[in-house]
Image: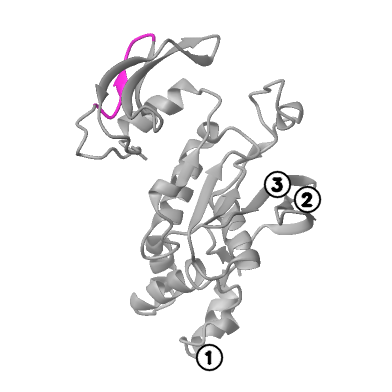
Amino acid sequence: METFNVVGASLEEIAAAISDMGEPSYRARQIYYGIYRRLLRSWDQFTDLSKDLRKKLEQRLTINYPSMRRAFVSHDGTRRYLFEVAPGQYVESVYIPEKYRDTFCISTQVGCAVGCLFCATGKLPFQRNLSIGEIVGQVLFMKADRCPTFGRVNVVIMGMGEPLLNYDHVMRAIGLMTDPRGMAISPRRVTLSTSGVIPGIRKLAEESVIPARPRFPLPKMLLGEDGILLPTCSRQSGGFALRHYRCGAGHAYSDQQKVEHRSPARSLS
């Protein structure tokens, strides 16, 4: 019988699988919460479910994180994890402990197609995009390994690969991370770094993925024919600016900032 990995699955997808098993919908919420909030990794740990249901789940659904092959530990507590996501395919994630928060740096691709000369990953051949479960699984693994009590967590999507070249999987993974019914990581604490993939940045703008505070009625994104105008905030000067990014040779570069509005410094993120 073919099994379905629920790591990376949405509540709706889990509900559909549970419905096919003839179980009530509230069981899906219990499973979803158990996986993403309680960080349970085997059906035996779901003590709020009956033994008969747990046996049925074992036959149909799996809870699989990426396989951690090695951890490299620094003197300051930073840990770099090597995950094998498929035979011969590896990605790395980093746990960075700080006084008031923990930061998880995660990967989105095996290798990278961009090939930035200053980046070690850019020297590796691109193999494939990571799945939603492989992206979210990095966060779940590090959370369970280092800080199982959900405190203040930052997620930076700055690991191996270009996130906007794996747009759909990355956006769905962010949705799972920030879902208050599950992992409940604040959207303000998720940072996506890009090498400047203009189609992906445009898609972010069109889908209104990036929130802005209503108090500052700046346009969420202004798109020009030759580039993109992004509202930014300087915490040092307290000024808001519009920075123009132009397309050139497949990359983005910025013109000089033009200050549009000044007010006490507030983060837009």
Along the polypeptide, which appears first: circle 3 or circle 2?
2
Q: Residue 51 carries which label?
A: 1
Front in this rendered view, residue 3 or 86: 86
Residue drawn at x 52%, y 64% is 6
Q: Are marks 3 and 2 in contact (CB under 8 Å)?
A: no
Q: Which amino acid does label 1 sit on?
A: Lys
Q: Helix or strand or loop: what does disc 1 sit on?
A: helix
* Residue 21, quarter of picture: bottom left
Position of 254 with respect to 91 (left or right) is left
Rendered position, 94 above or below 126: below
Circle 2 crowding by C-alpha within 10 Å: few under 14, some 14–19, many from 20 = few
Q: Where does residue 20 sit, x and y in percent of width and height?
A: 42, 71
Mark 1–mark 3 Cα distance, whole angstroms, equals 37 Å
- In the rendered image, residue 229, in percent from the top left (x then y), is placed at 34, 18
Q: Is residue 230 left or right of residue 47?
A: left
Q: Name the residue under label 2.
A: 87
Point out the stretch of residues depicted in magenta: 219-226
Residue depth check, mark 1 versus mark 3: number of the one nearer the observer: 3
Is disc 1 surrounded by few (<14), some (14 to 19) or many (20+) residues within 10 Å? few
> Residue 97 got which mark?
none
Q: Which amino acid does label 2 sit on?
A: Pro
Residue matched to label 3: 92
Gap in angstroms between the C-alphas marked 1 and 2: 34 Å
Q: Earlier in the sequence, mark 1 or mark 2?
A: 1
Residue 153 within the segment the image draws in magenta = no
Quarter holding the N terminus?
bottom right
